[in-house]
Each structure stands twice: as C-alpha cells, then as structure tokens.
Image: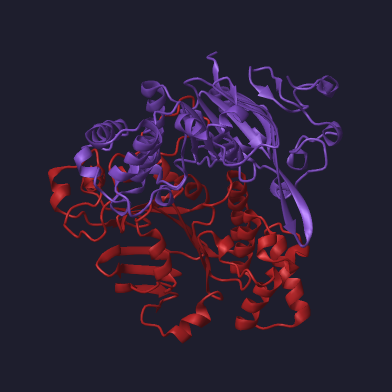
Amino acid sequence: MALLEVEHLTVTYGNVHAVRDVSLKLEPGEILGVVGESGSGKSTLGYAVTKLLRSPGQISAGRVLFEGQDLVPMAERELRKKRWKDIAVVMQSGMNALNPVATIRRQFEDAIMAHSPMSQTKMRERVAEMLQLVNIDARYADNYPHELSGGMKQRVAIALALVLDPKLIIFDEPTTALDVVVQRYIVQNLKMLRKRYNFSALFISHDLGTVLEIADRVAVMYGGKMVEVQAAGELLKNPRHPYTEALLKCFPDPRSEQIEVLGIPGTPPDLADLSPGCPFHPRCAMAMDRCRVETPEYISMGEAGVACHLAAREVEVGQNG
Amino acid sequence: MAEAILKLADVQKTYTRKANGQVQKVRAVRHVTFDVPRQHIVALVGESGSGKSTIAKLITGVERADAGAIVFNQKPFGEWRRNMREYRRHVQMVFQDPYAALNPLNTVRYTISRPLANYRALKGSASDREIERILETVHLTPVKEFVDKLPFELSGGQLQRVVTARALASNPQLIVADEPVSMLDVSIRAEILHLLDELRTKQGVSLLYITHDLISARMLADEIVVLYRGTVVEEGNAQEVARNPMHPYTQLLLQSIPNPWAPALEPNVDLSRLDRTSDDGGCVFRARCPHAMKVCETAVPTLKSGAAGQKVACFLHHAPETQEVAAP
C-alpha cells in the first residue's frame, strides 16, 4: 500500500485556486520531488498534505490518504498526534522556524516529551545522536538558534524533523536560502539519512537541479496543476511536457562547453482565472488551437504521467505503434 | 584592456559589534583589490559572509572604507565625497529584492520621474518622453500598458525591469547590481541577465554584478572575482575561472552546483569541514581546504598570476617564499 495517496486535491484561497485537481502517490521509502515556480501551488500542496493551511486556505475537494486513512475530515486532536511523530515538516528557511528563545536542546525535548516521553538521560543521548547525524557537535545543544550559522540552523531543523522517526517528511524549499556548498552538504546528508531511516519524503523546491539529484521521482507543477511526473533520470532524459523541457533548459550543465540559458518568455498564469485551456499555453512554443480551449487531462501511466495534448498524442502513438 | 572606470586598491572594512558584553571585530573586507574596466561586466562571486555586499556599500558610499583606495573615473572617492550628488548620478544600484526596492504607492512613471528631475532636471513632457525611452530600453513594452501601473500589478521580472529603469534614469556610467536575479523565478532570470548585457553593449554602461551563482557569472561577465571571507582568492577571465578554477574554494563552488547530468561524477567533497573557520593568520580558507599545508597556517597567500592566465591566492600554485613581496 502506498504511504501517501493524494486524490483529486483542490485547495483554494478565496477565489484563487492554488492547487487544482492534483493526485499523487508516495511509496514507503520513496522521495518524490515537487518542482515548480512561485505560484505553481507546490508549497500549498505541502501544507495541504499536513493540513497546516492558513485561513483562508482550504481543501475544497479531494482526499489525502495517509496509510489509507483520510486526513481531510480528521479532527485537529487526531492530527496533532500524527504530526511530527508520523508526518514531520521542514519549513522553508527552516532556520527561522526554530524558536529563538529556546536552546536547541529544549526544542528537541519539547518534541520528545509531547509525543514519546523518555528519561532525562535518554533524552540527552538522543539529542546528541540527532545532532551528530547532521554533523553538528553536541556542544551546540545548549546554544540558542541565533548563535548558529544559517546552514547549521537548517541542519538542526532537519534533525528535529527526524527525532521521532517519522514515516513521512515534507521538505519545503529546504536548501533555498543557503549557500551552494551548504546545499551540496544537505543533499549528501539527506541521501545518507534516508538510507538509514528509510523515511518517505515530499521534497518541494524550485531548484530542479537539486530535486533531480535527490528525488526518485519528480512531479512538475504549473499553475496549480500537476503537469508531469516521471522517474528523475527519465525526466532529465525524456521530458514529456513542454514546460518541463523549457524548465530543464534553465538549469545548464555547469561543465558544458557552451552555456546558453533562454528562460521561458511570458509570465505565470493568474490563479483566479479559471478559463479552460492548458495553463501553460500562453508561454508554450508548441501550443495548438486545442490547448487554448480544452484543459488537458492528466494521463497516468503507472509511476509516471503527463497533462499535455501533444504528449498524450505521442504516448498513444507509442502504445499503438 | 580597457581603462578602468572603477579601481579598488587594498580596500579594508572592519565592523565592530558587541556580543555578550565583549567587543568583537568582524573583518568583512580584508584586502580587496580589483578593477572594473570601462564597459566591462565584472562578477563578484562569493557566499554569505564573503563581504560582497559590504563592497557594494563601500562603492556606493553607504559605508566608508577603513583603509585602501576606491577610485572612480580617475578620481579618488574622497574627492567625490564632497559631491555625492554627482557621484550618485554616475554610480547607480540595482537591488536584490524588487518587491522591497520600490515604493508600493508610487506608479512606474513617478518612480522613474524622480531621478530624471533630481539628476537631469527633466520635467513635464521632456520627462515623459525620457520615461518612455527608458521603459523601451528595459523592454517594458507597450509602454502605455506599464507606465501608470503600481508595483502590486506587476510580476517579479517586470518589477526588476522597473528597478533597472530607475537606475538607468540618471544616465549612469556604472551600475552595481547586488544579486539582481536571485529572488526571481528561474524561467525569467535569463531575460534580466540578457537585459543587463544589453545595457553594457547598447548603453555603454559598466557593470559590477554581485552574485553567489558561478554559472550566471560565467554567462554574463567578462571577468570573475571570487571572494572568500573578505579576500579575493581568484580572479580572471570569466570562462577560465568558472570552467577551470585554480583555487580550492572556487573548485568547491563549482563541484557543489547540482549536476544531475553526470551522477557518476558526483563529488564527495569532505563536507565535515563545513563549519570550520580560520581567522588567526594564515590562509582564510585553510580550515575548509582539503589541500591545507603547513605553510598555510603561517603565511597569507596573495594574489599572483597562475598558469592559465587567472590570478590566484594559493600556495598550491606558487611557492610561499615569493609571497613576502607585497601585492602591487
């Protein structure tokens, strides 16, 4: 059974449709990358899965099945038991998500005491062990967040998410505000941690390069919709959706002889505008008449899928020929 | 090489701060020397804490250097200080966050009309004509559609064009752009980089492009200056520096860029050295350097010409004995 199944999820902020009819599946131990630009709905998706949406954000349709149990109608009291213990979150610039007036140790202890209390001695050991996992000397446990560098704070946030051995971790732009060398470290560190703890993760980021390195599969979002899902290696080699293809060109191979980045002309769609058609058609070089009037369906092909009239045609040809 | 419009010679800046009752010195800029040749684009590349934004503040006159010389148009900064208005007319800035750099209550027209009135005494229809010309330069066209808009009605990329247009309004000779694309979506970064390149080729503006991103520096700049903890560790032709870096720090930067195209090549950089710093004499990069030697503890390497044409401050590339000679 899949650990997490999101079915036809729609999230609205008033008349803004931030996430539109999104479905995805996450297997135990799998890292699913979610990529998109600002306004693509990727962070909203993460918050909806944990039901941490802020008003006026609300799930207006769909289901979020965690181990087969729908979280959407679940009472806040039940959810609180699951958060952190089963589903942990590492926030965007997690360094600012730490409590500034509590020591690092205190923040670990709060989480442990709330969910699975243990003795002081054991807790000390656990905190030291967790910090060591992210390569931070245990003597920092009694420091306050402001005494640590940005990269160290982000690693503390990751260690905090792991402390109760959760089954699922939602990473929301965990590397965005960090230096590139620190980003590299976090990616290497997360790969090691996943091997060791076998958690599943939604890794949400705008940085396709990083996502392709860390994720098993990658979901690409545009204008609140899931436009493509593929295994990371396949997505890189054979992107099916024109948006994915254009986005890949924005991340050049740093070792290539010539670097030409074209970008994608135009601007992202207005999420309050619900007129039919593919959300990407105004910026798509391959747009056809049909794309302007008819919203392409998301065609699921096992672990992968695509929402594009053109790609759908190619998939059909591929299957029949 | 073209004559330098801006020269920094051995510039230093130390901030003091109080922490736990003790006065701490933070050496934001140690000994920084580099030139911006006229009509060139020079990229200043460094991570947080490298001193790149402090250098921008020193060049624009927001902060004063403790020592060293900043020379703009053959005139030392001290002389310009007596006439900052004239200096600011020639040296303009583009900021990182276009959402914060514009007054939300002012239309595009008003925002651009202010420098036109202040620096060039343009008013009325002359000002309007110039606003139109500048907006065309930054490709906010059709101008009619944008000129009376407020910031909230524009996208991030469009706002950064307005910020650039405002910087252009005084007809500056040098623009200092501090991380101008890092807040923008990847799909629109390229357009802004192309625009900056156009300003150089078509308007003859010189540009200091401050960034943490080696790849965009390689795309846009003629020369790259790599900064680490207030020290220039490597500089030279942008292609050379970004493709065949000589300094271990620049090499680490290049290896750290995500490279899903070649997973087999994935570097296993020893990142356990990540949080170490060395601030007690010797090379500033020593504590994180995989090649650190005995000499790196005692002597400070200075910038010297390396084999491939770029200059590098590292004892791996030149013997320490010759280091006693002070940099020119």
User: Chain B, which colour?
Assistant: purple
Coordinates of residue A29 in the picture (x, y in percent): 52, 63
Give the residue drawn at x 43%, y 65%: A46
Coordinates of residue B259 in the picture (x, y in percent): 52, 40
Question: How many marks overall?
Answer: 0
Coordinates of residue B73 in the picture (x, y in percent): 54, 21
Residue A105 visible somewhere in the drawing: yes
Apparent side of residue B20 relative to residue A266 in the rendered image (left or right): right
Rendered view: A138 above or below B250: below
Residue A261 visible somewhere in the drawing: no
Give the residue drawn at x 70%, y 63%: A131
Q: Quadrant of residue B251?
A: top right
The front one of B220 and A209 is: B220
The front one of A92 and A227 is: A92
- Split into 4 quadrants, where in the image is the C terminus of chain A? top left
- Split into 4 quadrants, where in the image is the N terminus of chain A? bottom left
Apparent side of residue A96 relative to residue A2 in the rendered image (left or right): right
Q: Residue furthest top?
A: B1
Query: How are the residues colored?
Result: by chain
Coordinates of residue B14 in the picture (x, y in percent): 71, 43
User: Chain A, which colour?
Assistant: red
Give the residue drawn at x 16%, y 57%: A275
Rendered view: A115 above or below B297: below
The front one of B11 and A101 is: B11
